[in-house]
Image (cartoon, rainbow, N blue to C red):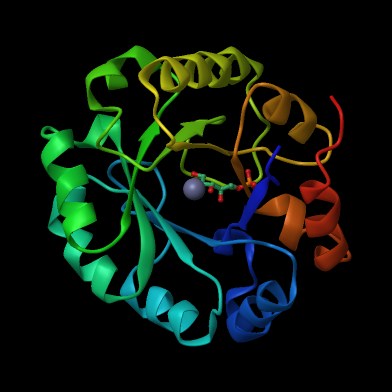
Amino acid sequence: MTDLLLAPSILAADFANLQRDVELINRSKADWFHVDVMDGVFVPNISFGFPVMDAVHRYATKPLDVHLMIVQPERYVDAFAKAGAAAITVHYEACTHLHRTLTQIREAGCRAGVALNMQTPVELLTDLTDSFDQVLIMTINPGFGGQKLLPLSIPKIQKMRRLLTEAGSSALIGVDGGVDLKTIGSVLAAGTDYAVAGTAVFGASDPLQAIEQLKKRPTP
Ligand code: DX5
Ligand code: ZN
């Protein structure tokens, strides 16, 4: 069994001390930086754009996993690739031509990811399993950090795992939202490869220890 990959979300960092928080993650056992970009249209919140992405990229020594919660993400794929993204995840619900956008992400030199909101069935990806490198199951309604994981997302992770196994796909399954020491066991048991965690890392009194504990694969 490979180790759980952990991607702390910069959304929960202290933006007045961004360099400090990025360097903290550099020193930790975390695997990626998760960069949440929100446009106030696709989700009811605005987070940040290129100036913050550039600042994170300047100091980060681990891959940047960019999660675009924006409409028409194809308009910004190339710019985020240039800004240093290692992976770019777009939402199924935001893409009219998902296959084209995933191809564009790979052509820009990044891992291609697709995120599914709660209402979007995993089966809708059946025909595209060769076209993405990672799939992000939203375990909350996106837009804000600090929410509680919705239990109805757990069977969805299992379904996604079955679908990828049947298709012979090696794409990674990620979860995003409400991941903490209480919930990580159940998402792992359901078949998760990587987990995003914002509040559980940056809200902890000792973020380095929190990362280690989250990566330990606690039993559900
Ligand atoms: C929510 C974002 C998440 C969020 C996770 O829309 O996509 O990545 O930052 O934050 P926590 O871990 O606090 O739920
Ligand atoms: Zn995210």
Q: In this orientation, does residue 188 appear?
A: yes
Closest to the observer: 168 or 175?
A: 168
Q: Which quadrant of the structure image shows residue 179?
A: top right
Closest to the observer: 68 or 5?
A: 5
Report the residue at 55% width, 72% height from top: 62
Horizontally, is 103 left or right of 112 in the view? left
Q: In this orientation, does residue 121 appear?
A: no
Report the residue at 75% width, 70% height from top: 28
Where does residue 174 sit, x and y in percent of width and height? 53, 38
Q: Where, quadrant-wise, is the N terminus in this rendering?
A: top right
Q: Which quadrant of the structure image shows residue 87?
A: bottom left
Where does residue 78 sit, x and y in percent of width and height? 18, 65
Where does residue 168 sit, x and y in percent of width and height? 40, 24
- Count of marks, rendered view: 0
Report the residue at 39% width, 17% height from top: 122
26, above or below 37, in the image = below
136, above or below 40, in the image = above
Where does residue 70 sit, x and y in percent of width and height? 28, 48
Q: Where, quadrant-wise, is the C terminus in this rendering?
A: top right
Q: Which quadrant of the structure image shows residue 15?
A: bottom right
